[in-house]
Structures are given as structure tokens and as C-alpha cells.
Amino acid sequence: MSRVTLKAGNSVARLAPEVGGGISELILAGHEILLRERNVDAGDADPRNLGEFPMGPWVNRVANGRFTWQGRDINVADGPGRDPQGLHGIGWRLAWSVLERSDNAACLGLTWDGGTGWPFPFSLIRRFSLSARELAIETRLTNLGSEPMPAAVGFHPYFPTLGAVVRAKTSSGWITDGVGLPASVGLEDVAARFQSGLVIAAEPLDNCFVGWDGVVVIDWPTHTLTMCTEPALRYLQVYSPVNGDRFCVEPQSAIPDAFNRDLAASGVCILPPGADLGVRLLLSVTPGVETERH
């Protein structure tokens, strides 16, 4: 299975175009930033085993795999992956093409013509730029159809859990129901602990936090990662499984199941024909110090 390798100084990014346009490895200034699943072969075709993959044209889950759009029933569960909740959209389920590449930059692209599971044609572009201490990823979703399209995008990175302390400014988070969908807003105590620094291994979560300012800082004993979005996204999904060796902090432009809720309040972007939704994610590493645990 092909990989695209980018290098800059002591930094390496390995992209997996055929596996959802994801990232199989990211080392910044000699530090492992993204953690792939350790029990799989490097040629594994499941993007969940990589270090990061894209979300779009929606994020997270859709209740019962269905929503209504302008009088039509859209069944995303019938799309690629045949997931009953249409998990994480379409982009991560398909092979991407390499549109451009150089020693430290690359552009991957995907075109969906519409059809079963998502009747709206679109394109997704991911531009990667690597420097000695940073990786920038620009994602752009464009409506290629002749009618308005509901849309959301996001990033799904996996980070090493061991020793990680996560800091983020959020106001609260969605408490989820038995199938992982937002049920009510709460978790103000967890949001407060995120602001001072949360030992992620001690907090099992699978929740979307709101009122986010677009910046996350992750401290490990040897280095610190700053992750920010431009423009600043408002929603941050955090997934930290019990006894897991990796966790997710997922910037996204909407909440889970946004298409079944008040669209404006949930972050849904309605793209007219030819319009696009773009966001840039920047991952920057600096040498760290031992962080006080809270």
C-alpha cells in the first residue's frame, strides 16, 4: 500500500492516500505526535488504525443514520462503510488521489459524484505542509452539485495517552445517551478541569465540548504540542477510552448528529452550489517540562 513521506529537519509525516487520506505517522522535532494502532501491519487498510483521518461532509454520528433535508429522507447508513450511524462521514472511507507533492508538502484530493448514502456531489482537498516543528493541514470541502448541501468537517487525530495532560478552554460539554449521541449540555466540571490541565488517562470521555476557543495544548514530560484551528472551530470532541494507549482530541465544525438538530445552533454550514468550507489545523511542538498534575 502506497505512502507519501514528507520530511523537514527532524520531522517526518507519512500520509496514506489510499486509506481515507489519513496520516500513518507524524514525528515533529523527533517526538512521536500521532499514535497508530500498534497491533496492525503498516499496510492495514482501516483508517481507525492510523494516526489521523479526516471527517466530512459530516462529523461523528447521525442518529439512526438518517436525517431530513428539504423534504427528502437522507440515509447515510447506506453509504460507504455501511455504518448504522454513518460514523465520521464519507471521506475517511474512500481512497484519495495525490494531486501535488514535494519534499515537505503534498495535496490529496477526493471527488464524490453523489449517490447512495449522500446524494450531494462534493470534493474534499487536504493540503499538508511540514516544517521542522510544525505540520499544517488545510481541509476544503466544496459543493459540486446544483443544490444547497449541509456540511461539516473535522480532524480525527490519535495521541499517546501515557503522560499526557490536556489543556483547552471550553464552557461545557454534551452528555451523551446510550448510543453516543448528544442528550443534554453539562460537564462544566470537566470543562473547568480542562482549563487547568486534565490528566487524560484519568478521565474516560466520549463527549463533544462547546464554547471552545480553537486551541488545545497537550503536555507530555518531554514536549508540548499546541493544536489550533484557523478560523477557530467551536466544537471539540474528546475520546479517551478506559485503559487505552491513545486518545482523540477532534476539532470539528459541528456537534455530533448536527443534521437532526437546529442547524445554526449545531454548527452546520449550508453550502450553496460552488461554495466551500475550509479550515486549517496547525500542530506545533516545543520542548516541554514536567507538568504539574491536577
Image (cartoon, rainbow, N blue to C red):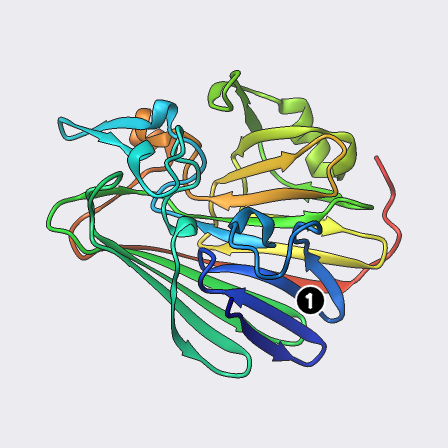
Q: Residue at x 53, y 16 (%)?
A: 178
Front residue of this view, candidates 196 and 37: 37
Image-based side of 11 in relation to 109, left or right = right
Q: Is residue 149 left or right of residue 36?
A: left
Three-letter amino acid code at the position of disc 1: Ile
Q: Mark 1 Cα within 10 Å, few/some/many (few <14, many 20+)?
A: many
**Left or right: 29, with 76 as reference point:** right
Task: List x then y, in percent, for residue 78.
Answer: 29, 35
User: Which residue is located at x 83 percent, y 34 percent?
Assistant: 294
Report the residue at 26% width, 38% height from top.
117
Q: Nearer the viewer, residue 267 or 97?
A: 97
Can the viewer see residue 292 in this picture?
yes
At numbered mark 1, what does the secondary structure look like: helix, strand or loop? strand
Question: In the rendering, at what x and y percent does residue 187 appear?
Answer: 62, 22
Kindly give the residue lying farthest to the bottom in the view shown: 103
Q: Is residue 42 above or below residue 10?
A: above
From the viewer's perspective, is 86 left or right of 252? left
Residue under pointer 1: 27
Residue 262 seen in this snapshot: no
Horizontal and vertical percent position of residue 217 = 68, 50
Residue at the (40%, 29%) spot, across then down: 85
- Residue 46's place in the image compared with 96, above or below, is above
